Image: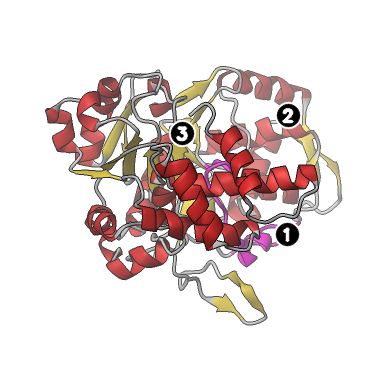
Amino acid sequence: MLAQNKGEEDEPVDDAAGQLGSGKTPVIPPAPGSIRETGLNETFLENLLMKMLFRRGQLTLGQCCVELRLPFPGVVEDTYLALKREMLLEVKGGNDLSTVGLRVALTNEGMSRAKTVLEREGYVGPAPVPLDAYKQQLANQPVKWSQVTDESMRQALGDVVVSEATLEKLGPAFNSGRSMFLFGNPGNGKTLISERMARALRGRMLIPYAIEVGGQVVQYFDGSYHTPVPSAMERKRLDEGGSPPIDTRWIVIERPFLIVGGELKLAHLDLTLDPSLMYYTAPVQLKANGGVLMIDDFGRQQVSPRDLLNRWIVPLEKRLDYHTLPTGLQVAMPFEVLVIFSTNMEPKDLVDEAFLRRIRYKIEIGDPTEDDFRRIFRTCCGQVGLAYDQEMLDYLVDRHYFQENRPFRAVHPRDLLSQLVDIANYTGQETRLTRDLLDRAVATYFVAL
């Protein structure tokens, strides 16, 4: 956990003493004191400020600082003065040229220049960090999978029923930090187990909002995948004159856990230039750096398993992922991610032996035993607010499983009990376990299975 400020017990302190992630504590970079310290050149920052003013209209210099995540002294101030000297920007209000309260806007020439820049570089947002800075920051906060122990495994899977035999296989696999296959019948918790195991990654990490690569911008932060951690100092960053002690181009997040399924295409694994926005978005494996990427329903993607694994042979072994920009520049991106291939099929039916050797751990998540099924059912009763009734569970197992020669699945109790509650609420019956409600839930759940 991060250290805490007195009076702010619920909020982490994002300073050099903060504990972010496992292993060596990463140090949040200090706020850049000059354009040179941003790692970006003057023209890049001038273009970024012009594009923002083109899109937003008049802004105070303080608001520009907030939007760009850059400090006023030495960075936004110098960029503003350079544009003013070139008569691309003008002051619209205020009388103190040394303050950040000045309202500024583009001149006609500035509008024309910004429009031209936007046609080839459409990114508008927080200033990016250079690729080398991102690589260094990632190296400063490595994933220590070797810290995954039997105790942490059991803690992470505390609300999931997993057999001892399966636990004994999962533990060394996650401890190795290497990619793995999880296979078995659908509905037995492959995704749930992977998600819970991702929790074993204690701590947080830093990521940039965007990365600058060869003069191009790659949007990195993705709110649908990355979970920000509330940060007291982030709120204090730049509020009409405030100057943050840290570089707010970085954001503190929980270590990521990404799931992609049948929609995955080869194009999703490369830097993608959005033709309408005119900037790049990071591929899924880059967004998952420092965490876990799960390829769900492996074998059902819009790309063949062979092509997908061919694409990742080098990254899985070398921890580097190579991308080529339209300019011809080849870029090596870090590949510090644990990849889990999850499938309902037999791995040997998807890829040949040579590929399987590269994925060292192949673990079957099998059907639950009757005892495990009963444990899951009892747990799910509590989760949906139903009083547990062993007699009704005996009836369900005997009538709808043994007599029907139906296999147990880990997901069945949750789904059946949820449907039982729905039926009871609709019909106005008392919400409790009865033969009638169990029969009706079974009739609507298993009819097409």
- Dot 3 falls on a residue whose secondary structure is loop
Residue at 79% in and 40% down: 104
Q: Quadrant of residue 339?
A: top left
Q: Quadrant of residue 319?
A: top left
Q: Quadrant of residue 57?
A: top right
Color scheme of the displayed model: secondary structure
Residue 36 in sight: no
Magenta includes 241? Answer: yes
Q: Earlier in the sequence, mark 3 or mark 1?
A: 1
Q: Which mark is residue 152?
A: none
Could you say where residue 195 lies in the image, as x and y percent from the top left?
Answer: 44, 50
Residue indicated by mark 2 = 54
Q: Earlier in the sequence, mark 2 or mark 3?
A: 2
- Say what amino acid the circle numbered 3 marks: Ala
Span highlighted in magenta in the image: 221-244
In this orientation, which residue lies closer to the viewer: 202 or 59? 202
**Front position among marks 3 and 1:** 3
The answer to whether mark 1 and mark 2 are in CB contact below 8 A is no
Q: Compute the Cα span from label 2 to label 3.
A: 25 Å
Q: Is residue 230 above or below residue 103?
A: below
Q: Earlier in the sequence, mark 1 or mark 2?
A: 2
- Say what amino acid the circle numbered 2 marks: Phe
Residue indicated by mark 1 = 241
Q: Compute the Cα span from label 3 to label 1.
A: 32 Å
Q: Magenta region, mostly helix, strand or loop?
A: loop
Residue indicated by mark 3 = 282
Magenta includes 358? Answer: no
Q: Is residue 343 left or right of residue 348?
A: right
Residue at 76% in and 47% down: 425
Residue at 32% in and 37% down: 341
- Say what amino acid the circle numbered 1 marks: Gly
- Dot 2 falls on a residue whose secondary structure is helix
